[in-house]
Image (spheres, grey):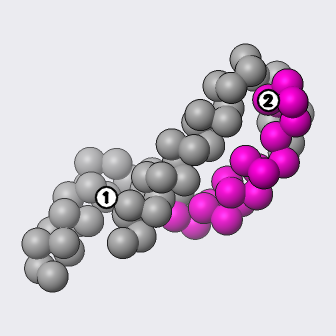
Amino acid sequence: MSSHIFFLINNIKQEPELIKDLDRLKLTELGLGLLDEAGNCPLCNAVWDKGELEDKFKQRIELSKQTKK
């Protein structure tokens, strides 16, 4: 247990954005589900190369879920 806590603290120190990512996990999951065929952002309508935003959402979700454990 203590090694897991150390791991989490170390990750947060290295990447302070992890806390924000945890807060945004549900929004990111919803955004992934709402991507259109072109892959544009469903939240701000920004144009992305096809697949690029999907990959970014998936990476953020995976990282957030790992941090949550």
Q: Is residue 56 magenta?
A: no
In the picture, measured across the screen, residue 35 lies left or right of residue 8, that is right
Residue in front for this viewpoint, 1 or 22: 1
Point 87% across, 30% down: residue:
37
Q: Amino acid at mark 1?
A: Ile
Mark seen at residue 12: 1
* Secondary structure found at label 1: helix
In the picture, measured across the screen, residue 12 lies left or right of residue 40, that is left
Q: Position of residue 3 (x, y in %)?
A: 11, 72
Using the image, determine if residue 49 lies above or below residue 9. Answer: above
Label 2 – label 1 distance at C-alpha: 30 Å
Residue 46 visible to the viewer: no
Among all residues in the image, which is located at the extreme top?
Answer: 49
Q: Position of residue 2 (x, y in %)?
A: 11, 79
Q: Amino acid at mark 2?
A: Gly
Disc nearer the start of the sequence (2/1): 1
Q: Position of residue 62 (x, y in %)?
A: 48, 52
**In which quadrant will I find the C terminus?**
bottom left
**In which quadrant will I find the N terminus?**
bottom left
* Secondary structure found at label 2: loop
Q: Position of residue 54 (x, y in %)?
A: 67, 36
Magenta residues, start to end: 22-40
- Please give the residue where the numbered disc 2 appears in the rendered image: 39
